[in-house]
Amino acid sequence: MERIAAHSFIFLTILLGLYGQIVLKWQVNLAGPPPTDWPMRAAYVWRLLLNPWVLSSLLAAFLGMLSWILALGKAELSYAYPFTSLSFVLILFASAIVFDEPITATKIAGMALIVTGIVVGSR
């Protein structure tokens, strides 16, 4: 039962991180490229920080940290941490679905190496 709880918290941490990254990219895309001068760039960042969607991504990061704390209470760090690499795989597919970003053979090969590393590292 402890193992199931540990994996649940690890997976929740990854999903919350995925949510945060997708929302941030979405909102940055809507905001457009940052200005080149510093006063306008600071205003750009400030507007994004006050954006409710961006705030929800910050909340997701905080909740992800809490979930990670609970995961570490149930599993060894050396066991749990390699699973966080699954976020790279999920981000690849989510960015392709949400933002129409390309999935190349090179990216797939890299993801296969990451997954192989997770399998080997978690044993």
Image (cartoon, helix red, strand yellow):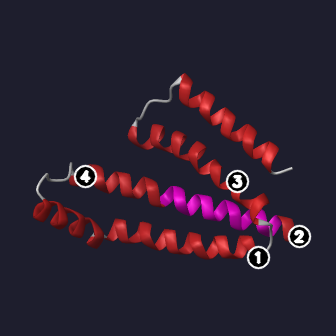
| Location of mark 1 (residue) | 73
Q: How far across and down, in percent of the image, does residue 9 sit?
A: 70, 68
Q: Give me the disc on residue 30.
A: 4
Q: Which of pointers 2 and 3 indicates the residue nearer the eye? A: 3
Q: Is residue 39 left or right of residue 62?
A: left
Amino acid type assigned to the residue bearing label 3 in the image: Phe
In whole angstroms, how far apart are the C-alphas of marks 4 and 2?
43 Å
Q: Earlier in the sequence, mark 2 or mark 3?
A: 2
Residue 84's place in the image compared with 8, above or below, is: above
Q: Are marks 3 and 1 in contact (CB under 8 Å)?
A: no
Amino acid type assigned to the residue bearing label 2 in the image: Met
Q: Earlier in the sequence, mark 4 or mark 3?
A: 4
Q: Earlier in the sequence, mark 2 or mark 1?
A: 2
Q: Are marks 2 and 1 in contact (CB under 8 Å)?
A: no
In whole angstroms, how far apart are the C-alphas of marks 4 and 1?
39 Å
In whole angstroms, how far apart are the C-alphas of marks 4 and 3?
31 Å
Q: 97 or 91, which is in the foreground?
A: 91
In whole angstroms, how far apart are the C-alphas of marks 3 and 1?
15 Å
Q: Earlier in the sequence, mark 4 or mark 2?
A: 2
Q: How far across and down, in percent of the image, does residue 69 sit?
A: 67, 75
Q: Is residue 100 magenta?
A: no
| Location of mark 3 (residue) | 83
In whole angstroms, how far apart are the C-alphas of marks 2 and 3?
18 Å
Q: How far across and down, in percent of the image, does residue 58 sit?
A: 43, 70
Q: Are marks 4 and 1 in contact (CB under 8 Å)?
A: no
Span colored in magenta: 4-19
Q: Residue at x 46, y 61 (%)?
A: 20
| Location of mark 2 (residue) | 1
Q: Quadrant of residue 46?
A: bottom left
Q: How far across and down, in percent of the image, does residue 62 sit?
A: 51, 74
Q: Secondary structure at mark 3?
A: helix
Q: Are marks 4 and 3 in contact (CB under 8 Å)?
A: no
